[in-house]
């Protein structure tokens, strides 16, 4: 591996114009493909294998054109003080709004008049119009949304308070500004790390090229592969993150090779042969984590994982080919002026000058840990353990409009319905009665209605509505509790528990669905997939890291450290977003269950980044150990060369993710906080403290591998031992043009 990458790095450096032209051409082709591709269809969100999805599919067959999973909107009216919604003037406004909504778009399926649908509160202060659409919220076109907004604005001019809730106005959160902030922070961190604007610009430029090719390719192939507009979201986030990291690793190693007196082509080859090997295997761990999302069996999540994995592959290929080519163009400018001057003086002083070099912060920290490994390990583990305690109380669910900011119209509409009718009206359950196998369809539906009415937590059940064939009915069940509550989830469970009795007594099959039922099933599916996903990702990565490090204990330590950091980060998320600790500091207006996708999402994203840091840091230690250094000294060497780079990469990622905490969307805020916290814990506590402490305590045992396993595992030579022997055997061929001072002064 190292020898092949070494040759590739030298080739890319020598033929830099050709290599750069290829990547520019790929970017252009992908861009043209994206620009000329037809508009991708939005995902029809489906969750195979769930009862809610089964009910939706049944409704599409038995109620053709009913659009069971179509978008909905609730236009909520509140009368001024002293008035009621049943007053003639107010009633006329609502009736006019009903007509406006019916005429607003051909995508409108139905508009329920509140005076006929019993959608006026008992005290007469509140009423709402339920509007259903023929398509889901992601397929709803702008004219339909504009017509909904205009109808509400017209009604409000009459003096009524009008808010619009539901998912019809749901939009993808705007993240452009946070991405720009993240890139700007990345540029500053890179400039400080390298002390050179050119060296700082290289990772950013190549990362953006990689993301550009990846996202453009996704857009170009969207129609062919059935990808939606949301597929590229994860790909952009991960592609930018790993693209910067991988380029940072290669450029840093290239500068280190130059500092040891090698010519530029040789330095590029060695950088790609050593750090490039770490990049390849780090990339493989990220790909495993992303492709593993298929285990969840949610089509949209699977597509997002595969698309993001493709972007990671592009980032790896760019790191091992385009980076050395661009370094060839950069010349001496990869060092700042002061650094070039110091390096020239040190190289002029001879090879012994490196011994006089002052220890950097990474070296000093590693020496401190090696002196007190047990103390550092205990403090780090106990600290993460304390942070993880709240995770025991983790409650998963999907957010509804009740988690929106108080100032938002959706939240105000949600609160108005809760106050006027009860919280359950914000997320009614739909019960489907398949009476095709029943002798008395109407009797079966009535028995179901009576039984459900008697359950605890039920505020009301509507009469059954049958299809034309008379073999299928739907009932609307209103819970006494808000849609995202555990009590509503328990109610759904109670109804489903009664289903077997209905089947035995009447021959009718009863299914619970609706948006609330679907959310509950999604949460359960994600919860059930968590352990298999974790076992798959960590297990495969363990095997991969065992090949990389030729050790059993080092990969085991890496996996356990990652699990500790993720659980600690989940604990922090629970403390802030579920318990409300420091809620004001982070702008959390409503506490509640943690988004059900959060644990799997955090595992997938953070695992990839954590293994990046692990591979890059520990590979340098392994390299030093294989080349003859004592275990403790190898740890110091790894930190001397890698700590600054890993710290910079982690600070960049934390800054990028933390930028999302300022979002008004609670879901985006939670993701930003969770990912930033997880990277903070993993990079600075696990990789910087626990890793060196454990390696110091293990000593040579850290690199132990049974002989039979050593023979069975493929030797990929990540640490470059084979490369080193080859270079030592043919020094003349590899060291031509090696006058370091001449290289530093030549562009």
Image (spheres, rainbow, N blue to C red):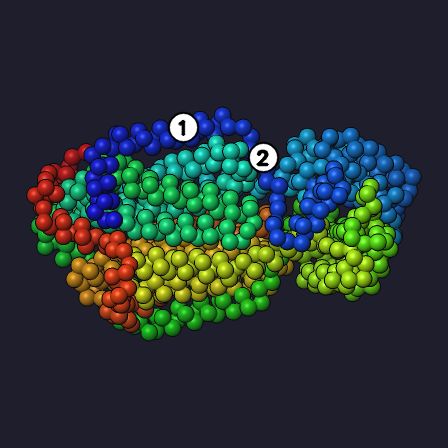
| Position above or below: 70 against 574 | above
Provide the secondary structure element on which disc 2 rests. Answer: loop
Compared across the picture, whether 411 is left or right of 601 comes to: right
Viewer-side residue, 33 vs 234: 33
Q: Position of residue 86 (x, y in %)?
A: 90, 44
Q: What residue lies at 80% left-to-right and 47% top-to-bottom?
A: 471
Determine whether, in the image, residue 571 is placed left or right of residue 355: right
Q: Which residue is mark 2?
A: 41
Task: Answer yes or no: is residue 249 visible.
Answer: yes
Question: Does label 2 or label 1 sit earlier along the sequence?
Answer: 1
The answer, for residue 480, to whether it is visible in the render is no
Residue 88 at x, y percent in the picture: 92, 39
Q: What is the number of the mark on residue 29?
A: 1
Q: Which mark is residue 696?
A: none
**Decide: marks 2, 1 in contact (CB < 8 A)?**
no
Q: Residue at x 75, y 56 (%)?
A: 510
Quarter-wise, where is residue 634 in the image? bottom left
Please report the residue visible at 32 percent of the width from the left and 49 percent of the height from the top: 279
Mark-to-mark CA distance, 2 and 1: 22 Å
Q: Quadrant of the C terminus?
A: top left
Residue found 39% across the figure and 31% down from its top: 27
Report the label total.
Answer: 2
Q: Residue 566 placed where, x, y %? A: 46, 61
Between 506 and 455, which is closer to the camera in this rendering?
506
Closer-to-camera residue (601/383): 601
Asked if 578 appears above or below 270 in the picture, the reply is: below
Query: In this image, 358 relative to 422: left or right?
Result: left
The foreground one among 571 and 472 is: 472
**Above-or-below relation of 153 to 492:** above
Residue 654 in picture, x, y percent from top left: 43, 52
- Circle 1: element type: helix
Residue 390 horizontal side relative to residue 148, left or right:
left
């Amino acid at each position: 591996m190292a020898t092949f990458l070494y040759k590739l790095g030298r080739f890319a450096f020598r033929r830099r114009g050709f290599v750069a032209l290829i990547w520019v051409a790929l970017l252009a082709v992908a861009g043209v493909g994206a620009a000329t591709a037809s508009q991708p269809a939005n995902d029809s969100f489906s969750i195979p294998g769930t009862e809610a999805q089964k009910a939706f599919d049944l409704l599409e067959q038995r109620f053709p054109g009913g659009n069971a999973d179509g978008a909905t909107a609730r236009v909520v009216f509140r009368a001024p003080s002293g008035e009621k919604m049943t007053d003639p003037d107010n009633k006329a406004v609502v009736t006019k709004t009903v007509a406006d909504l019916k005429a607003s778009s051909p995508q409108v399926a139905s508009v329920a008049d509140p005076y006929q649908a019993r959608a006026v509160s008992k005290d007469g202060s509140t009423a709402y119009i339920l509007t259903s659409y023929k398509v889901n919220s992601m397929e709803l076109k702008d004219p339909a949304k504009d017509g909904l907004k205009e109808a509400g604005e017209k009604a409000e001019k009459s003096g009524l308070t009008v808010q619009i809730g539901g998912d019809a106005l749901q939009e993808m959160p705007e993240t452009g500004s946070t991405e720009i902030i993240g890139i700007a922070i990345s540029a500053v961190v890179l400039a400080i790390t390298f002390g050179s604007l050119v060296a700082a610009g290289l990772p950013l430029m190549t990362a953006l090229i990689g993301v550009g090719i990846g996202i453009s390719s996704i857009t170009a192939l969207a129609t062919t592969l059935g990808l939606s507009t949301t597929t590229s979201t994860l790909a952009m986030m991960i592609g930018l993150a790993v693209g910067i990291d991988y380029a940072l690793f290669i450029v840093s190693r290239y500068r280190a090779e130059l500092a040891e007196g090698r010519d530029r082509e040789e330095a590029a080859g060695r950088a790609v042969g050593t750090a490039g090997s770490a990049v390849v295997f780090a990339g493989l761990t990220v790909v495993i984590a992303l492709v593993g999302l298929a285990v969840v069996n949610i089509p949209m999540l699977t597509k997002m994982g595969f698309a993001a994995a493709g972007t990671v592959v592009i980032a790896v290929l760019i790191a091992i080919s385009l980076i050395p080519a661009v370094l060839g163009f950069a010349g001496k400018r990869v060092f700042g002026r002061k650094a070039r001057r110091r390096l020239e003086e040190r190289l002029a002083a001879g090879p012994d000058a490196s011994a006089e070099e002052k220890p950097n912060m990474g070296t000093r920290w590693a020496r401190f840990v090696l002196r007190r490994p047990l103390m550092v390990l205990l403090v780090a583990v106990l600290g993460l353990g304390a942070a993880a305690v709240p995770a025991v109380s983790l409650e998963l669910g999907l957010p509804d409009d009740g988690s929106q900011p108080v100032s938002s119209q959706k939240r105000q509409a949600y609160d108005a319905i809760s106050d006027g009718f009860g919280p359950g009206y914000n997320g009614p359950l739909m019960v489907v009665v398949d009476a095709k196998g029943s002798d008395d369809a109407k009797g079966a539906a009535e028995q179901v209605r009576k039984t459900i009415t008697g359950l605890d937590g039920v505020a009301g059940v509507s009469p059954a509505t049958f299809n034309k064939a008379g073999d299928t009915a739907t009932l609307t069940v209103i819970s006494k509790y808000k849609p995202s509550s555990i009590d509503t989830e328990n109610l759904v469970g109670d109804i489903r528990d009664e289903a077997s009795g209905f089947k035995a007594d009447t021959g009718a099959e009863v299914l619970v669905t609706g948006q609330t039922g679907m959310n509950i099933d999604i949460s359960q599916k994600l919860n059930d997939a968590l352990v298999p996903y974790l076992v798959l990702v960590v297990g495969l990565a363990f095997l991969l890291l065992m090949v990389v490090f030729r050790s059993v204990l080092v990969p085991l330590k890496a996996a356990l450290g990652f699990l500790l950091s993720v659980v600690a980060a989940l604990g922090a998320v629970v403390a802030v977003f579920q318990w409300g600790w420091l809620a004001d500091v982070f702008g959390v207006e409503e506490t509640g269950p943690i988004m059900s996708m959060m644990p799997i999402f955090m595992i997938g994203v953070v695992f990839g980044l954590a293994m990046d840091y692990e591979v890059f840091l520990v590979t340098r230690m392994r390299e030093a150990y294989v080349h003859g250094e004592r275990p403790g000294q190898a740890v110091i060497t790894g930190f001397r060369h890698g700590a600054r780079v890993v710290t910079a990469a982690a600070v960049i990622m934390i800054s990028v993710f933390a930028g999302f905490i300022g979002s008004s969307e609670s879901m985006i805020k939670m993701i930003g906080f969770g990912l930033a916290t997880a990277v903070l814990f993993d990079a600075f506590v696990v990789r910087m403290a626990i890793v060196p402490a454990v390696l110091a305590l293990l000593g040579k045992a850290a690199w132990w591998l049974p002989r039979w396993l050593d023979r069975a595992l493929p030797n990929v030579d990540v640490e470059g031992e084979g490369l080193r022997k080859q270079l030592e055997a043919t020094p003349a061929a590899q060291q031509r043009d090696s006058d370091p001072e001449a290289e530093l002064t030549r562009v």
